[in-house]
Image (cartoon, rainbow, N blue to C red):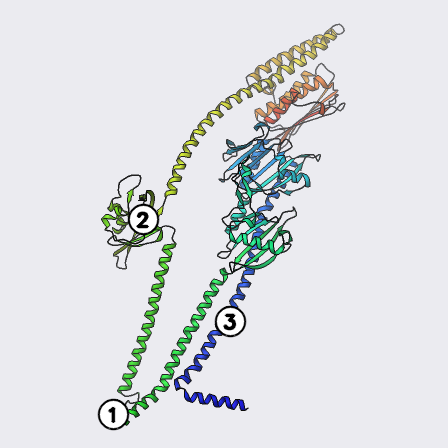
Amino acid sequence: MVNKNLFIQALTNISTQLSLRTVLIVPFILQISAAVGLTGYLSLKNGQKAVNDVAAQLQTEISRRVEQNLKSYLEPLHNLNQANEVTISIGELDIQNTTKLEHYFFEQLKIFDGVNLIGFANLNRELFSAERYSDGSLTIRESSKSTGYELRTYRTNSKGNRLNIIDSGKNYNPQKRDWYQKPLQTGKQSWSEIYPHVTGSTLYIAASQPIYNRKGKLVGVLLSNLNLLQIGAFLKSLKIGKKGQSFIIERSGMLVATSTKEKPFQFTKAAIALPEKKVKRLLAKDSSDVMTQAIAKYLETKFGNFNSIKSEQQLDFKINGKRQFIQVLPFQDHRKLDWLIVVVVPEDDFMEKINTNTRTTILLCIIALIVAVAVGVLILRWITQPIITLKESALALTKGEWEKRIEIKRSDELGELAKSFNSMAHQLQIRFVEMQDLNKALLQSERCLKQFLEAVPVGISIHDSTGQLYYANRITQQLLGIEILAEVESEQLAEFYQIYLAESDQLYATAQLPIMRSLAGETVHVDNLELHQDNKIIPLEVFSTPIFDETGKLVYAIAASIDITERKQAQKLLADYNSILEQQVAERTQELQQEIAERSILTERNRLAQEIHDTLAQAFAVVIVHLDTASRKLTTDIEAAQALIKAGRDLAHSGLTEARRSIKALRSQLLEDGDIFYALNRFATQMFSSTNTHIVCQLIGEIYPLPPDVENNLFRIGQEALTNAFKYAKAGEIQIELAYQERQCSLRIKDDGQGFDMNSVSIINSFGLLVMSERAERIGAKLTIQSSPGQGTEVSVLVYRE
């Protein structure tokens, strides 16, 4: 209680020594200052908490987006392989028909724009594929026996037909590739190791799977490839704050993709044997990007190695004293793909606005403090002024100065004058504050405009109505080779700044300068200017336009200048390239024409050989059998011998007629006389008339016309099958079945003869079987031959109807 009384007494003593203004103002200012300080402190704390929350949410959202998009990039590769495996297994896609296989992959690339290569490698070291080339065009890639096992890349037209070779690599063996070996080891879909493209231009990852025939025997490997730069392009498209970034790494620390301009690989300068050897993968900790390198080293230090990161991690650390928020998300699938997604957001991306808001809050509080102090002073003056006036009046009266007496009454003329003066002063003060604010805004606008013009990546210059250079940004100063704006007469602009007409030694006409034409009211665009500076010629493209004031008077002209040196160089390179390309195309066209002529001759030779085999050879073989039989019966049955000789003669005549028609590329006479069922029936009857073989002909469905070439080749295949049965089978019965269905037509010829071992006969070594196979391939038919000793032989041909 004593201390309280002492405090009150001390406070009373102090207050009696202070003026009335101090007693009123100091407590008021202290209260306002405390409120301002508390407001600023709470604003800063709330801002920091908001930063942590927003950073965590943003990192989680971006990580999930990257994860989802990675799945959308990677999963379709295996889905595509699986779909192709089903298509092959059900017989809709024949892996032996490589031309159709290439076209099928080519059409798939048009649909799946996220896939860079679709292909198939067989057991013969052969690879057939379609690939999206580096310039976006679709190409065909083949390495096979026909190419000498060179990996050749062909440019194609819109239908997938080959045009010319644009790249080749020697001694390519797909069976040594990781994408080929892994699925064979696992027996299922697999991811390959990331590997360089054979051209040495980028990195690929392959999804591959083995395929087996119906007997479970391996026939090859399907693959679908993705260019890792596509993942990098997606990461670049993400908006991660202002300076945030993301990247993907393997557990080994190797970069997979990054949102920076850096590629996840480097090119070696050492001598190499193959182009793909010049690509060297990059460890994240060896990255040229400071943030990527620092984060990789931080994670490796914190966890020992990247394999220790088993779950999602949210971390933060500092680079050069600046805090960075990090989120690490493992990305895995059941095919043993194991990557890490890393998202980094600098704290400055969030704190910039928050610090700005905090500074604004503090500034507003200071302004509020100043306003409050000003109001407090005014209130104090309003309270103390009558007392001061009374004091001055009293002093004046004591001194006899009557004229200085001040009337306190506010309703008389002096009061009205004081009120008017105070009102005028107050209005002037308000206007002065407004003018200060306007001046500040104007200066700020001018500074912003200059910053904008300096930031524009082209030269900007402004000339007044007399042609004098009023403003030039940094790029314009560099182009003109000046540091200070000089006063130059408009007639001397071209000479002073060395402005020449493009590709000449003639100064640009002053009246035709874009800025002078714009000062005359034109909007101008030209690209025929050159600056000659320091033994260097800079070609320019210039846009200029006049600027008018609110009355329509021309006051300025503004010009934008662009250095087009690189464009001019590119145009020259393009012209040179087109000239070389035209020459190469002409040479290649001549080579192709010669090759086509040679192939046409070879094709005609093969056709004549087949036709002679199918006519004369078959007819003579049957005639020989008839004559052999007749010779044996001459002594026992002269009539039967004569019948056999007559039948042989008829067959010889028929064979000769067929050969003549075949050489002229005409259809068989039997087909001219009737349909294919009639032709086969008549041929079989004529051939086996002298034997005890029973011929059974069966027609299923309603006959419809087939293309002449299809019908003729189908008849020749049946003719060959019947001739083989006559010569070798010794059959008691031969069945001929011709079936017409809605989508396909099939021919089946089956005998119950002695048959043969399929493994002991090669199509290549048997001309008859080779001819049947080639004829079936020519019409797109499926040929099947089944036989075993003592079980007879069955030949079936399946033709799909268009």
Callout 3: helix, strand or loop?
helix
Q: Amino acid at mark 3?
A: Leu
How many labels sit on residues?
3
Q: Residue at x 32, y 70 (%)?
A: 435
Instruction: Give x and y (percent) for residue 692.
Output: 74, 16
- Residue found 52% across the figure and 46% down from its top: 263
Mark 1 to mark 2: distance in Å? 78 Å
Q: CA distance from mark 1 to mark 3?
A: 59 Å
As measured in the structure, the alpha-carbon distance from the residue carrying label 2 to the one carrying label 3 is 53 Å
Name the residue type under label 1: Trp
Residue 42's label in the rendered image is 3
Q: Position of residue 265 (x, y in %)?
A: 54, 44
Which dot marks residue 480?
2
Q: Residue 589 at x, y = what percent?
A: 46, 27
Q: Residues within 10 Å of mark 2 (few under 14, many from 20)?
A: some
Which badge, 1 or 2, is on the more N-terminal residue? 1
- Residue extending farthest front: 270
Horizontal relation, residue 375 to residue 553: left or right: right
Query: Dot 2: what SS?
Result: helix
Please determine whether, in this image, residue 275 is positioned above or below residue 313.
Answer: above
- For disc 1, the marked residue is 402
| Res. 645 mark | none
Under circle 1, the secondary element is helix
Q: Nearer the viewer, mark 1 or mark 2?
A: 2
The reply to whether residue 92 is in sight is no
Residue 133 seen: yes
Q: Are marks 2 and 3 in contact (CB under 8 Å)?
A: no
**Residue 70 versus residue 55 in the image, above or below:** above
Instruction: Tell me which corner region of the image, top left, top right, bottom left or bottom right, holds residue 787.
Output: top right
* Vertical placement of residue 238 versus 133, above or below: below
Query: Label 2 amino acid?
Result: Leu
Labels 2 and 3: the sequence-earlier one: 3
